[in-house]
């Protein structure tokens, strides 16, 4: 980096992963739910500084695959994505990394992973809307 360039500090990003998602399946007692398997795969990945992966219980999208939330501070929009499977950790990582690189959470549609384009459950405005 040149002396005249300054590093842009990105607001923290949280990736919330529903660990109770069962993808509409009956899970035997003691069985590992698909959401917990997705969480485990995501925990094992290398994340950019400022991205935190957190487990949460029930995002109320139980029969529509695994669900995740991307949220950040400031003027960032929050997104809820669903219809994920435990083997889609790479897709989630790609989408979360792109989200984290923005100031607003608004990743251009064509730059989002294809699954994110077609499986957005909700888009929630930031608490502080820009004027």
Image (tube, rainbow, N blue to C red):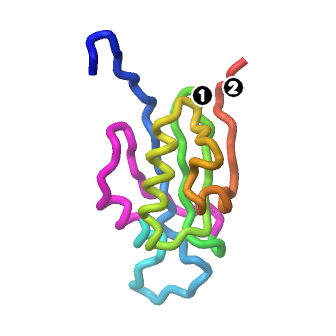
129 in relation to 20, above or below:
above
Q: Label 1: few (<14), some or many (≥20) within 10 Å?
A: some
Q: Position of residue 25 (x, y in %)?
A: 57, 84
Seen as rendered, the residue at the extreme right is 131
Q: Label 2: few (<14), some or many (≥20) within 10 Å?
A: few
Q: Earlier in the sequence, mark 2 or mark 1?
A: 1
Residue at (31% x, 58% y) in the render: 45
Residue at (41% x, 84% y) in the render: 31
Please name the residue that numbered disc 1 is placed on: 75
Q: Which quadrant, please, contains the C terminus?
A: top right
Q: Is residue 46 left or right of residue 51?
A: left
Residue at (39% x, 25% y) in the render: 9
As helix, strand or loop, the secondary structure at mark 2 comes to: loop
Q: Which residues are magenta?
A: 39-61
Label 2 to label 1, Cα distance in Å?
6 Å
Residue at (59% x, 41% y) in the render: 107
């Amino acid at each position: 980096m040149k002396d005249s360039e300054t590093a842009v500090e990105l607001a923290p990003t949280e990736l919330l992963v529903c660990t109770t998602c069962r993808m509409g399946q009956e899970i035997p007692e003691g069985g590992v739910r698909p959401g917990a398997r997705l969480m485990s795969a995501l925990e094992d990945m290398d994340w950019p500084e400022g991205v935190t992966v957190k487990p949460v219980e029930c995002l109320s999208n139980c029969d529509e695959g695994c669900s995740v939330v991307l949220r950040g501070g400031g003027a960032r929009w929050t997104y809820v994505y669903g219809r994920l499977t435990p083997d889609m950790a790479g897709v989630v990582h790609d989408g979360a990394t792109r989200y984290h690189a923005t100031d607003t959470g608004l990743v251009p549609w064509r730059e989002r992973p294809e699954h994110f384009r077609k499986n957005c459950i909700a888009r929630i405005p930031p608490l502080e809307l820009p004027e």
